[in-house]
Image (cartoon, rainbow, N blue to C red):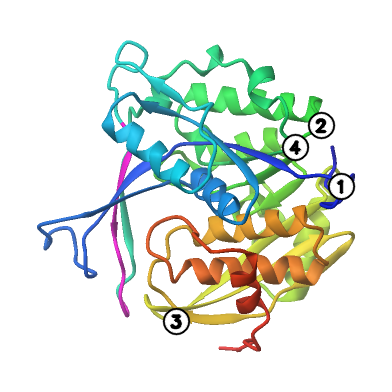
Amino acid sequence: MSISDFHPSEHSYRFLTFGEIMLRLTPPNYEKIRMTSSFDATYGGSEANIALALANLGIDSTFFSVVPDNSLGKSAIRMLRSNDVHCSPVILSTPEETPTHRLGIYYLETGYGIRPSEVTYDRKHSAITEYDLSRVDLDALLEGFDWIHLSGITPALSESCADFMLECLRKAKEKGLTVSFDGNFRSTLWSWDEARDYCTRCLPYVDVLLGIEPYHLWKDENDHSAGDWKDGIPLQPSYEQQDEVFQHFVERYPNISCIARHVRYVHSGSENSLLAYMWYQGHTFESKKFTFNILDRVGGGDAFASGLIYAMMNNYKPMDMINFAVASSVIKHTIRGDGNITDNAETIKRIMNMNYDIKR
C-alpha cells in the first residue's frame, strides 16, 4: 500500500516498528561520569523513540523488541505503555533463550557550551542480540499494520537481527505496507563497508528514506561506492547540491517516494540550528531554518523522522511536511530523555509557524 493510496479521513494508520530499547544513565547537572555519584535513569532507542512520539501525536503505534524477563525489561516496556505505545508483540526472554539475559545500556554525558555531549554504549550481548528471531511468525507480526519503520542500527546488533530485518522488509512489501527506513550509521557497531553493503540490500524495499547516511550507503553494479560522486557534497549542502544528490538517488531507486534529511549547524554544545531538505513528488523542498538552545539533544533525529511520518500520514502539503518534521526535532531538544513527548500536533505547529527563519 502506497502512502498516496488513501487519505486520513478514510483511513487510520496502524504503525509498527522494530528495534532495541535501552536503559539510559545520565549524570545530573551536566556532570561528567568521572565526577558524578548518581545517574538519572530513563529508557530509549531510535525505533522506540519514534513509536513513542507518534503515539503521543495520536497514531496507533506498536513496538516490537526482545527484552529480558526481569525488572529492567519490564520497566522499559512499562515506560512505553505509559505513553500509549502498544507493546503486546514484545518478547520477554528467559535466561535459557538469551544466556546473558540483559537489557542494553548507554551512558550520556550531556554537553554544555563548547563541550559536546558524549555517549558510551554497553549493549553487547543484550537480549535482542541473543534471541533467535527466526522463531518469530512474521505473517502474524505484520498482520493489520499499514506502516513499518526500520533503521540501520538494528541490523548492526547481530546476524540474527540483520537476517530478521531483511525478511521483515520483504514480507512488508508483499503485504503492501509502507516502509520507512533511517540509515542511522553507528561506527561503534559495524564498519562503513558493512553498513553500506547491508543498506544496499534494503533500499529496493523502501518507500520513505530518512537520515544523512543512506545517500552514500550503496554500491553500483561495478562495485563502486556512491562516494565516487558524493565526495564534493559537504555535510551542510546548498539547495542545489542536495537536489543533485536526491535526483541521482531516485534515478537509481524509483521505488522511493520520499527522501528527507535534516542539516545541523553547531554553534556550541548548547546552541544549534536545523533545517531540512526533502524530495517528494518530483521536487526538492527546503525547510525553514530554526536556531535554538539545547536541553537534551538525544533523539532529535528520531523526532524529525516521527514528525515527517506523522505529516505524511495526515496528508500535509509538502512544505508543511518538512517544516513540521524540523519543528518536531527542534521541540525535542527542549525535552529531557530520548522521546519527543508532546501534548499534541498543535504544539509542534506553533513552533513550525513561528517567524523563525534565522540565518546563522
Mark closest to the chain's N terminus, 3 or 2: 2
Which residue bears the numbered disc 4? 146
Q: Label 3 amino acid?
A: His
Contact between labelled residues 3 and 1, with CB atoms less than 8 Å apart: no
Q: Which residue is mark 3?
A: 267
N-terminal-most mark, 3 or 4: 4
- Dividing the picture into quadrants, the one containing residue 174 is top right
Position of residue 239 relative to residue 74, above or below, is below
> Residue at position x 30%, y 75% from top?
112
Q: Neighbour class for label 4 at 10 Å: few (<14), some, many (≥20)?
A: many
Cα distance between the residues tagged 3 and 4: 40 Å
Q: Is residue 67 left or right of residue 205?
A: left
Mark before the other along the chain sequence, 4 or 2: 4
Residue highlighted by disc 1: 10
Q: Secondary structure at mark 1?
A: loop
Which numbered marker is on residue 176?
2
Q: Position of residue 269 (x, y in %)?
A: 37, 75
| Residue 34 image point, x, y percent | 12, 59
Residue 116 shown left or right of residue 306 in the figure: left
From the viewer's perspective, is the residue at label 3 or at label 4 nearer?
Answer: 4
| Camera-nearest label, 2 or 1 | 1
Q: Is residue 348 magenta?
A: no
